[in-house]
Amino acid sequence: MEIQEKIIQYKYHIIFIFIISLILVALIFLAPSFVTILVYFWPLLLSTALFLVAVVFFGKTSSPGTESSSDKAGEGLLDYVAGPPEQVVENFKQG
């Protein structure tokens, strides 16, 4: 009788361990193997690796641009995003 009382006392623990064990067994036997996943995704992994190699290659071989040309390249875009100067806005409000 003492064993049955202990089992009843720990019944939630036993049920929890049993469910966790079933989940682990299901994952081990039903989940695809690592090789299967690798075979499925090898084109994606290969293209990503080639892209990263190309980025590193062009980053090392291309010469850095001059400071003045890079400043002028983004200047128009920054002016467009920033909007008109404050003087123009003030004159527009007054007139």
Image (cartoon, rainbow, N blue to C red):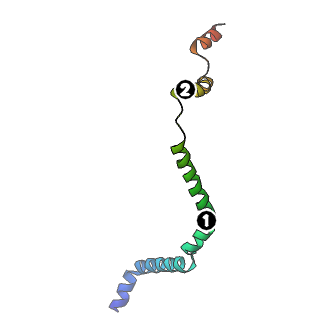
Q: Nearer the viewer, residue 47 or 86?
A: 47
In the figure, 38 relative to 91: above or below? below
- In the image, residue 30 lies at what x, y percent? 57, 78
Question: In terms of image quadrants, where is residue 4?
Answer: bottom left
- In the image, residue 92 lies at what x, y percent? 65, 11
- In the image, residue 70 lies at what x, y percent? 55, 29
- Tell me what residue is drawn at x 62 percent, y 9 percent: 91
Circle 1: is it few (<14), some (14-19), or many (20+) Cα within 10 Å? Answer: few
Q: Nearer the viewer, residue 84 or 13?
A: 84
Which residue sits furthest right?
Answer: 95
Quadrant where the N terminus sits is: bottom left
In the figure, 28 relative to 87: above or below? below
Cα distance between the residues tagged 2 and 1: 42 Å
Residue position marked by numbered label 2 in the rendering: 71
Amino acid type at circle 1 is: Phe
Which residue sits furthest top?
Answer: 95
- Tell me what residue is drawn at x 37 percent, y 81 percent: 9
- Tell me what residue is drawn at x 62 percent, y 12 percent: 88
Amino acid type at circle 2 is: Asp
Question: In terms of image quadrants, where is residue 95?
Answer: top right
- Tell me what residue is drawn at x 47 percent, y 80 percent: 21
Residue position marked by numbered label 1 in the rendering: 41
Q: In the image, which is nearer the foreground, mark 2 or mark 1?
A: 2
In the figure, 2 relative to 10: above or below? below
